[in-house]
């Protein structure tokens, strides 16, 4: 069987997804070439695992469940727009986290520790919780900053976080398709 491209994430509420979808529809007409994230695919990644043999998913799911059980459910407020590495040299456009950052970082840290025990390498960079709006394919200096001007204070709303989800990702012509392999309730 083929390895599964996998990651662990937190889902967002339909209302947050809808607000972001409307924002992306407005930004789509800008001069920069951006591969926008489909509204149905917007999530908050906790850890990317890469290619995993399908027979390993039960043990990974069990480790995620154990880590998630150590964190109580919480709320996240999504606010602000930015870019990695910077707005002047953007590669990834994102929506930030205003409230709930501490709890997200705790959940991510526990999951990362559990995945390290499963043989996965921890992320080299410090965790920066965000929702990916799109990946910049081509833009001139300042195009992105001009496109986002006046939207820096964008409020996407809030979501209750009550579970972590182990997903597989299958790449296709229209972008990736995500399939939930396991759900791990928080505080269980």
Image (spheres, grey):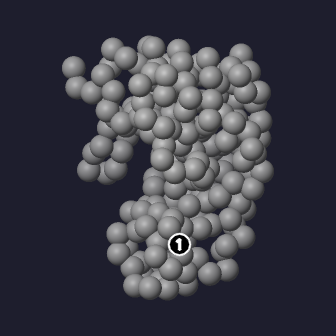
Residue 90, given in percent of the width and then of the height, sits at: 47, 72
Are there few (<14), some (14-19), or many (20+) residues within 10 Å of tag 1? Answer: few
Relative placement, left or right, of 69 versus 90 is: right
Relative placement, left or right, of 31 versus 82 is: left
Q: Which residue is mark 1?
A: 86
Residue 28, given in percent of the width and then of the height, sits at: 46, 71
Q: Give the farthest residue toward the left.
A: 1
Quadrant of the frame with the N terminus: top left
Kindly identify the residue that appears in the image at 49 percent across and 27 percent down: 115
Q: Which quadrant of the view contains residue 49?
A: top left
Kindly identify the residue that appears in the image at 50 percent across and 80 percent down: 88
Q: Which quadrant of the view contains residue 98?
A: bottom right
The front one of 122 and 11 is: 122
The front one of 25 and 73 is: 73
Q: Work out whether residue 29 can be spotted.
A: no
Residue 183, given in percent of the width and then of the height, sits at: 56, 23
Image position of 127 with respect to 88: above or below = above
Residue 15, given in percent of the width and then of the height, sits at: 67, 49
Q: Which quadrant of the view contains residue 10?
A: top right
Kindly identify the residue that appears in the image at 68 percent across and 41 percent down: 104
Q: Secondary structure at mark 1?
A: loop
Kindly identify the residue that appears in the image at 51 percent across and 34 percent down: 8
Image position of 122 with respect to 133: above or below = above
């Amino acid at each position: 069987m083929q390895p599964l491209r996998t990651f662990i994430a937190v889902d967002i509420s339909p209302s947050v997804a809808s607000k972001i979808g409307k924002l992306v529809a407005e930004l789509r007409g800008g001069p920069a070439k951006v591969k926008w994230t489909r509204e149905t695919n917007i999530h908050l990644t906790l850890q990317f695992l890469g290619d995993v043999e399908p027979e390993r998913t039960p043990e990974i799911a069990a480790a995620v469940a154990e880590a998630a059980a150590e964190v109580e459910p919480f709320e996240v407020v999504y606010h602000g727009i930015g870019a990695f590495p910077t707005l002047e040299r953007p590669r990834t456009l994102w929506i930030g986290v205003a409230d709930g950052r501490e709890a997200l970082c705790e959940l991510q840290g526990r999951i990362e520790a559990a995945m390290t025990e499963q043989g996965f390498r921890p992320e080299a960079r410090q965790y920066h919780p965000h929702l990916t709006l799109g990946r910049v394919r081509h833009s001139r200096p300042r195009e992105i900053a001009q496109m986002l001007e006046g939207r820096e204070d964008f409020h996407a709303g809030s979501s209750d976080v009550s579970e972590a989800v182990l997903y597989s990702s299958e790449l296709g012509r229209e972008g990736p398709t995500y399939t939930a392999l396991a759900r791990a309730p928080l505080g269980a």
